[in-house]
Amino acid sequence: MSESELKQLSLFQPCSSAFLEKLDAHKQIQNFKRGKVIFIQGDEAERFYLIRKGWVKLFRETRDGAQAIIDVVPAGRLFGEKAVLENDHHSCTAEVVEDAEIVSYSLADLKKELETDSDLTKSMLQEMARQCHRQEKELEHRSIQNAAQRIGCLLLRLSDQTAEGPVSIKLPYDKTLIAAQLGMQPETFSRALGKLREQLGLEIQGANIQIDDLQKLVSFSCSACSFDFPCKDLQEAAE
Amino acid sequence: MSESELKQLSLFQPCSSAFLEKLDAHKQIQNFKRGKVIFIQGDEAERFYLIRKGWVKLFRETRDGAQAIIDVVPAGRLFGEKAVLENDHHSCTAEVVEDAEIVSYSLADLKKELETDSDLTKSMLQEMARQCHRQEKELEHRSIQNAAQRIGCLLLRLSDQTAEGPVSIKLPYDKTLIAAQLGMQPETFSRALGKLREQLGLEIQGANIQIDDLQKLVSFSCSACSFDFPCKDLQEAAE
DNA sequence: CGAGGGTTTGAAGTGCATCAAATAGTGTGG
DNA sequence: CCACACTATTTGATGCACTTCAAACCCTCG
């Protein structure tokens, strides 16, 4: 019998195999095309989701269509599970932004387990604290960093932060979405990235970016941040 | 024997009297003047705090002195307790902004209880989820609302949202701090508040503000927000 | 090949920040 | 109770960062 893939997730580290098997028993695997909406803010929540492949954006929107990105979730991470803390309703909308393979599980099963398994509760508390922390950082960035610095920070998060020489990265999804995630317009993103190219010597070809001097980028972006540089905690579990 | 004042807090609702008495046994009461720093980001954490009177701001700052306000905590709320989730270190600095009377308790006692009391853990998880939610809202506001709308939103949070007629409120601390909390400069705050006065008929005398037509303010501010109006959850437990 | 979305570039406008200075408000010691 | 010092707040002038609108370009995919 194979191990549940949920066992990979730090949230479920402390859980019994029995529980994970129970979750697996009602799992459902689906493939979604880009643009597919999985749930909508306010929806009654019945399932939570694990991304095997692809990307999903979580956002809220106002009546006049303005969107605020809550998170862009990579393969290997959960989403929708927070509904257990919000009266079984989703507090945001989830939309696939890169063709995705997604496994879903019963939220009721999770909720029931939380009643009795205090280790799971602790684990969830830890996860929640981490997310809170990430949001604090993001809020700080919005008020202290300018557009170019925020982009630099994102690039650093996508990089191998321990590397010595030049680093190559590939933007994992649309620049338009990255811009929205960073709280700026696509035009601003494009121009600010151009500025990084000129001033810090980044090489940019479409979604591929090479950073010759990581240190230069660090001192550019992290000077306007209260956290110390090697700060790999934001986008854990990338593909 | 009197009830512990901690029993007032939703976090401690599920706790045994025995535990609360234990906390009380090591409590410490202190009066702090405005400007007093209670702990600094990075400090080893030994105690957590309950504000009886006054206000405390939580913030982080960069090397060059730029501050990001994490929260401004009113009387009746805790702070510093999140260190139990952060390796017993404070992740921000706490400074008194209005002369305060503060009770502190042993963080170790709290941490120990969390090991065994799963109801307390659940309660803490709920609190954390609420805070996450508040931060999400704040992040959204920063990207979607302009300065005047954010101020309007704050005024609504300070108001009795169910009132029919005119509403009077008093700003609880410095305008400069409110500005920082909303992510803007004091000058911008002053001008934007002036705009609200002109365009929505607010009457402003120093820290006292009267709103004649709440509805007008709602449609001004909440049109750029994805949450529905009566949204009293941000600044619970004001004095 | 053509349609459609993503991306870039340009030009112009706006909101907010910054710098500077005036004004109001508060607490102090005389 | 007043004068002073100090801070908070307001106001004005100017500059910059980002947005907005418009158009061109590019890429992918049917």
Image (spheres, coloured by chain):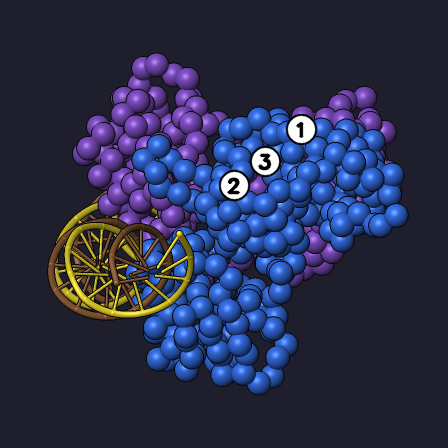
Chain colours: A blue, B purple, C brown, D yellow
Decide: is D26 above or below C29. Answer: below
Is residue A142 visible from the viewing direction of this image? no
Q: Residue at x 41, y 34 (%)?
A: B226
What residue is shown with label 2?
A: A94
What residue is shown with label 1?
A: B10
| Eye-nearest disc, 2 or 1 | 2
Q: Image check: C24 left or right of B72?
A: left
Q: Residue at x 49, y 79 (%)?
A: A211
Q: Image check: B213 left or right of A28?
A: left
- Can you give x and y, in whole percent of width and height, for residue D3 in the image? 26, 52
Discs 2 and 3 lie in a common subunit: no
What's under tag 1, amino acid-wise? Ser
Farthest-out residue, top:
B164
- Along the viewing direction, whichever of B205 and A133 lies nearer the viewer: A133
Decide: is A199 above or below C6. Answer: below
**How far apart, in angstroms, are the residues tagged by discs 2 and 3?**
20 Å
Q: Residue at x 83, y 46 (%)?
A: A14
Q: Image check: B236 left or right of B163?
A: right
What residue is shown with label 3?
A: B130
- Along the viewing direction, whichever of B194 and B97 lies nearer the viewer: B194
SS state under label 1: helix
Q: Which quarter of the figure is the N terminus of chain B placed in?
A: top right
- Along the viewing direction, whichever of A41 and A99 lies nearer the viewer: A99
Is the Cβ of the residue at disc 2 closer than 8 Å to that at disc 3? no
Decide: is A142 above or below A218. Answer: above
Q: Chain of mark 1?
A: B
First in sequence, mark 3 or 1: give its number. 1
Tag 1: Cα neighbours inside 10 Å, few (<14), some, or many (≥20)? some
- Can you give x and y, in whole percent of width and height, for residue B65 in the image? 46, 65
Q: Residue at x 60, y 83 (%)?
A: A164
SS state under label 3: helix
